[in-house]
Amino acid sequence: MARIAQISLHTSPLAPLGGRDAGGMNVYVLQLSCALGDLGHEVDILTRLDGDLPPFEQLHRNVRLVRLPAGAPRPLPKDEIAGYGSEFLRACRELILREGRGYDLIHSHYWQSARVGAALARELRVPHVVMFHTLGEVKNRARISESEPRRRIRAERLIARRADAVVTASRHERALLERYYGVPPQRVRTIPCGIDLERFSPRDPAAARGRLGLPAAVPILLWVGRLEPLKGVDVLIEAFAQLPRTDALLLLVGGDGEADGYRRELEAIAERTGVRERVRFLGPVPHEELPWYYAAADLCVVPSYYESFGLVAVEAMACGTPVVASRVGGLAETITDGVTGFLIPWRCPEPFAEKLEILLENRELRERFSAAARRAVEPLRWSRIAAEVSHLYHELLARRAAARSAGEGLAEPAPGGVR
């Protein structure tokens, strides 16, 4: 088995979910690392120190979280963290020198981490695997008000072309990498995200509502995620206001203090449309508590403008909660329209309201979607996904070993900075 560095520079996998920089990627890095540890790999998750926390923390069998200094040891805006890549790289080098051992493979997550990972992999002469989770070019095209910086897009394009492998969570993202970034298809490997099917499983709705203090006999709609315009929450509130059921509740889970400005905009929309009293902004919820919210809800709604995979939809489906989602990105691959949920091709309230009303008024259809959804996500259990990632690692390591045996790539690379 191999010694793997999972690099997550800008956010720790232990960060509270629902904040500005904490979401599906955090879950992915943590759960993948633990599943790889169960397979026997030795995994270090390298992240930036952002508080009064220990430098090392054992998270799981064979899995260690390593917090490295880069910038002030406090939470920083994601864009500002990008300027500390070289400092983080130096900390990685010092860790390796101090412990007297390197890594067999580097797996980077998000573009900022990938800049560090590419440099570190060159120095160690080991394979570099990248998963971007979101792509700047695609975000800018998904919604006109998005303004991802050009330096991000340039970095993604360069790193994607040079990495030993780029992992995508969906075939759609793979096609986007080839179309917008010119990545050779043989360098891209599509492996979906995983799901903890023991934690995310059907639970008694009445018990869930009792636990959360929710009324027993009213329709409940649920949205989960980071509170940002790209998630389409404004569309959801407008659709919710069009529903004929005036006793329904809309629960919005996610968003921290950094999202206060956008939350006020959404509150104004809810006030204008007459549903403010029935829209509850609940803030972030611990990941282990989310199954109770999915169980309590009649429907989960994912009205995003862009989702590379759509973890929230998969979690809801695993809990047996029908999903109404945008037909974008990975959502179009995880949800089968009319079988496990509904997919909406337009980002406007009316079609969402139509499908929400159909499901709320048809218990038999909800139950049919629920059963089919749970079956559909069974192949996504983490043990299976980690086995696919592990196979990719071994394939790259074997290829690198063969190249070295043939006398290729033996020149000592000069240490460099983040580019």
Image: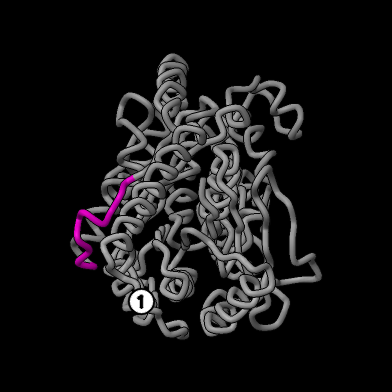
Please state which of residues 184 and 61 is positioned toward the viewer in this rendering.
61
Please state which of residues 309 and 169 is positioned toward the viewer in this rendering.
169
Q: Secondary structure at mark 1?
A: helix
Determine which residue is flagged by label 1.
155
The picture quadrant where one finds residue 209 is top right
| Amino acid found under the numbered disc labelled 1 | Ala
Q: Residues within 10 Å of mark 1 (few under 14, many from 20)?
A: some
Tell me: residue 16, above or below residue 144: above
Residue at image location 52% in from the left, 58% down from the top = 269
Please state which of residues 94 and 7 is positioned toward the viewer in this rendering.
94
Tell me: residue 166, above or below residue 60: below
**Magenta-colored span:** 181-190
Q: Is residue 187 magenta?
A: yes
Tell me: residue 317, above or below residue 235: above
| Residue, far top | 364
Residue at image location 39% in from the left, 75% down from the top = 148
Q: Is residue 224 visible?
A: no
Give left or right: position of 167 versus 8: left
Residue at image location 26% in from the left, 62% down from the top = 406
Give coordinates of residue 198: x percent, y percent. 60, 27
Q: Is residue 88 magenta?
A: no
